[in-house]
Structure formats: structure tokens, C-alpha cells
Amino acid sequence: MDLTAALRAFGSGRPHALVVAPPGATAARLAVEAELHFRGWPAAASPAEADLLLVCGAEAPLAPYVERVWLSMGVPRARVQVASAAEAAEALTRAQRQLARAPVRSPEAEDRAGLDSHGGHGGRESDGGHGGHEGGEEDVAGLPLADRADDRDGLELDRLHVPLGPILADWPAGLVVHAELQGDVIQTAEVEVLAGEASEPPFWNEPWLRSEQGDTVLRGEAERRRAAAYLDSLGRLLAVAGWEDAALGARRLRDAALAGAPAAELLGSAERFARRVGRSRTLRWSTDSLGVVDRDSAQAAGVAGAAGDVTARWQRWLTETVAALGLLDDGTPLCTEDLEGPRGPLGVAEPPSAALLSLLPGLLEGAELGGARLIVASVDPDLDEVAWSRARKEALV
Amino acid sequence: MSSSAPLWSVLVLPAVLVAAACVLVAVESALAGGSALAPAQEAARLLVQQRRATVAADSLLRQAGIVTLPVAAVLAALVLPLGFQSVSDLGVGVVWFNALEVLAWAAVWMVGWGSNSAFGLVGAYRYVAQGLCYELPHMFALITAALAAETLRVGGIVDAQAGLWLVVWMPVAFLLYLGSALAMSFWGPFDHPVSSDGAGGAAAELSGADRLLFLAGRRLLLVVSAAFSVPLFLGGGHGPLLPPWLWTLVKTAAVLALVVSARRRLPTIRAERLAELAWVVLIPLAIVQALVVALVVLGR
């Protein structure tokens, strides 16, 4: 066995995985994340870091972006589709086997890696479709140079068109924020959703939607799902805030809740977790006065829970998680009139996440990139809801 | 009492530093619930992985930045004493150390800029902004220790602590030094320049051997700058019973343990928030500490 092969055999025991979960694939994503955690495989922050590309559910709405991310990954690399939650463990094993067999040198990848690396995860946008470019004579390697505009202090600075998303770690996959950046400050933000149409109801709202259909759903079961939804959002926010240890804690609790762990055990660890995170002055300091939504506009949009700054939103998740876990043994059936899902009222024309998305551009403009990531994570729109409501409207027409 | 080691120690130094960095990452990985072998696997993985470049990247600048980071860390360590012996006990040791540390500014910025990627660029400028926050408190902390010992020679500073460790009468300078050492190695709560919210920031486009070298350089910088707090504030090799070299190792391990626990307890401190804290609180604190020490030195 030569040295490269030996290094490869040893190194492929712990590959870095980039997980792509297009709208509608939440259940598969959760299974993949739990499996990654079980195996101790880290999640990659960028395509450059990744060896495995794990696409959950149907990649259709994100197909061109998935392709670009794939081409921008260095070899050896492997790509696997995880169609459903049940397949997660088998798919990861398959991915590792593929990685072990993948070619170490690929001329195609060397030519194209750079060209496409910007597509999926937010480099310079090269299509020039946003106007303002001075024509072709200033292009460098096929990429237009940045145009200039006044910034908020009246200084003429480069303005970069940078799409945030649709594939980015700890980001709602399918969400694209077309941002104009000056330095790292977002001057304008436009929100686009690449959602497609989901065939399954949104994972986080499923108990309430079943109850709406006439099934008997126990309160305790719905609250378990609600707590897991908030813990999932918390895990994402804490990861974006750079507190890996706490993010891991949130995700462990989430997986335990979904796996049906007993109420007393969950409640105890959730209370400890909430105390630990809630007490962190550094986290509050980092998220205070960011992305403030005033009470009236939150209420008008139908998402009263989104009121306040980023700190208020994660603190609300913490208290609601503990409150929901306190109701796990509630055996009464859900009342069908008042369908309050994790993100807001269901059973109205527009899903709550549509309202959350409509709040985003206003919150992002003027924020610096790190702040913007925290704002998106604290609003955490569930694009499954958007995909599902599109599918339902289609069905009605 | 302090002296320069024989010439061959130049060759041993990098190996010792790399070994220390390896132990650090292994312990860290084990504490985080992973396997202690994980960092070795990571290194093997990166050695095999293809190095990739972005379109219109400034490869020369990028490569220079990647190589500068570990080289600067090792060169800075030339004045780092083990016990009472360093590779070279320069008369201006403290200045040498600081000058080489500052190369990290250039290194990280060159890597981020040279990648020609928006996230790389943002990460690079985050590091420069962070530098504007930590560098002044850092330099004041270094100056305060040198002032108390009345020498810029690191060996001289260690000798001056034969009776009383400097940390005892300048705790603020010690804490500022340690915090700024973490910020300089963009590690733990100060990892904003390479944090995942910017897809890896300055390191976003690095893969394969490039990534390995950059990340290893960062660990070396962390080990060296944390270890330097031992001769500066914690008495270097001074201590009862144990031989001086062992005292140095024990104290360095204690400082690194403190550093690892800080990472698990704290989220990332974003550069924009750090700037406010640094200029309103930390820099005035550092100046007051230096002033108090200066008055004590004048009065004795």
C-alpha cells in the first residue's frame, strides 16, 4: 500500500459533509444530521472544506446550484442523495464507500473548480444581471468588476452583488438573499425563495395539520414537535453565533425529543440548557439590538412571536421550549379552531413563514454580514411551509 | 541566569512546537466528545485532498499568506525560553516577538484577499478590524511587563520574576495579554475572521494542503502566543522542586487548558462589538495598568 492510499484510508474515516436540504426535506435533513453526529463526522462550512455532498429529499428546486457546489468541491469527493429519513444511515455508508473509491485527480475538476465555486455559496455574482456594470471591457477572467456607489456615509465604494444562499451552512436551504455589499455592510437586500412544490406537509407543522384534517392528535405529541422545532432553530442560531458547544447541546436535545425520550428526562436537560444559554452575557451582547421588529408590525404580519431583537427571539425560543416540554404528558386532543404552529397561526391563507420572509429585507438592509446571518437565523423562516402552500394553491387552481 | 541554547536547538524548536500543537488539538477533540485521533485523520484527509483555486485568484499572494502564518509563529518562538534557555535571547526579544506576531495580520489578509471570494474578503477584513481592537492592549501589556523588568530581553524579564511573578502585581496586563493572544490566533471567541457564519471567512476557499498549512499555522500561533505569557507574567522557569524546563511546560499546559475552556464557554465575539469594548474599556485599562507599574518602578 503506497503512502497516498494509506493516508486516504485513514483520512476518509472522518469526512466533512456539506448537507443540502431543499424545502420539503426537513425530515431527511434531521435524520442525516443525527447520523453525522452519531458518526462524529463534522459538517462543512463551505464546498472547499467538504468531501461529501449529501442532498436530502428531492434536489429539483436547487439542482443547478447543487451541481455548481459539486463541481467546486476538491477531489476526492462523493455525492449521495438521501431520499428519505429512513435511508440516512445507509446513504452515509454508501457515501463513504464512494469516497474511498473516488478518483484522486480529476482534470475536469481542476479546470472548472474555480469557475463555479462562486455559484452556490455566495461569491461574486457573474451574470451581470443586476445592472450597473460598465460593459465588458473591464472584465477579469469573465467576471465583471464591481461597480461603485455612495455608501451610507457618502463615500464612493465598491458595490459587490453577492447572493447569500441558496446553499450555505446553517441557512434555510432554498432561501437566496440577493445582497449588494459595500465592505461587509448590506446596502440592499432582495429575498428569493427557490422552493418548488412539496408533496409532503411541512414537518414542523405536521401534528397540527393532521388535526385539521380530522385526525385525533394529542396535545403532548404536538408540543413535542413544537419543542423540537424551537431547538432546531436554536441549534442553527447558536451555530451562526459561533457557539458550537451550545449548538451541539440544542441539536442533541432536539434529536432526543424527536426520538421520543421520556418527558421528565427531556425537561430536566432542557432546563439546564436554557439556564446555560440564557445566562450567557456574551451571547446577549452579541445579539442585542440586532434586527429589531416592532410589536405592531409583527402583529400586523401575523407573527407576534418575531417581535423584538434577535436576543428577544432566541430567549422566546428558550422559554417556549421549556414550556412545551412541560406539556408532553398532556393527553387531551388538539382543539381544531386554534392551530398555533411553531412559527405562528396555521389554517390562514398565507403560512407564517411567508410573513417572516416579508420582514427580512427591511431587517437586513444596513446590517453587516455577521449581523445579517444572525438576523436570518433568528427569524428562521421554514421554507417547507412556503413549498407546501404553493403546492396546495396549485391543487386548488 | 538566562542564556541562549546551542545552535542545533533551531532545528528542534519547530518539532517541539508542532508536537505541542498536536497535543493541544488532540485534547481539544477528546474534550468535545470526539476521538483524540480525529486531528490526525483530518491532517491525512487534507493531505490527500485536491488543492483548488478560484477564478482570477491572486495565487502568489494567497500562497505567501498561507506560508507566512506558520513561519511567523516559529520565528516568534525563537525568543521563547524553555526553563531559562531560549534559542536566542535577543536584547530586543519582546520587540522581535511582537513584530513577528504582527505578520499574522498580513498573512490572514493576503489569504482572504488572494482567494477572490466575497466571503474570503469579508473574513480578511474582519481580521484587520479585530487587529485594530486587540493590538494596542496587546502591546501595552507587553510594554508593561518589560517596564517592570526594565529590559526588553525576555530572559531578563524571567530573571526579574525570581521573587515575585509579574502576574501578581499586574493581573490586568496578564488578562489583556491572554485575551489578545487568542484574538491574534483568531481562535475561540475571537474566530470571527474564519467563522462559519461567513462560510469559513478567510479560509473559505482553502482546501487540501493549503488548508492544512493555514490551520496548522493558526494553532502554532496560538501555542506560541499563549506560551509566551509564561516568561512574561508567570515567572518562566521559576518554581520550587521541579526543574525549570518542567515548570515552563506545566505553566504552559495550564494556560492552554484555560484557553480551551474559554472556547467551550463563549460564543464568537463579532469584530464590531469587540471594537467598542476594546476602545472604550480595554485600551484605557491597559494604559492605567502601565501607568501604575511605571509609578511603582519610578518609586523603587
Image (spheres, rainbow, N blue to C red):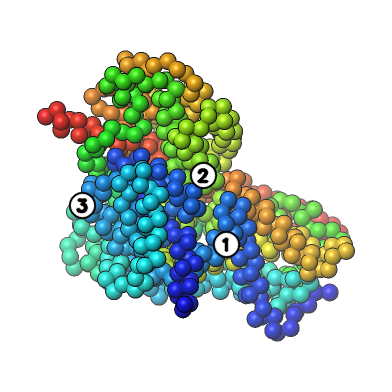
Identify the subunit bearing mark 1. Answer: B
Identify the subunit bearing mark 2. Answer: A
Name which residue lies at 68% across and 69% down.
B94
Q: Residues within 10 Å of mark 1 (few under 14, many from 20)?
A: few
Q: Which residue is mark 3?
A: A130
**x, y (%) of residue B10?**
66, 80
For the residues labelled 3 and 2, the Cα–Cα distance comes to 39 Å
- The label number, if any, that marks residue A248 in the structure image: 2
Name which residue lies at 42% across and 15% down.
A332
Circle 3: residue type? His
Which quadrant of the figure contains the C terminus of chain B? bottom right
Circle 2: residue type? Leu
The quarter of the picture where residue A28 lies is top left
In the image: residue B290, left or right of residue A303? right
Front in this rendered view, residue B287 or A145:
A145
For the residues labelled 3 and 1, the Cα–Cα distance comes to 48 Å
Task: State the SS at label 3.
Answer: loop
Q: Residues within 10 Å of mark 3 (few under 14, many from 20)?
A: few
Q: Answer with mark 3 or mark 2, whichever residue precedes in sequence.
A: 3
Front in this rendered view, residue A9 or A250:
A9
For the residues labelled 2 and 1, the Cα–Cα distance comes to 20 Å
- The label number, if any, that marks residue B37 in the structure image: 1
Q: Quick check: do tags 3 and 2 share a chain?
A: yes
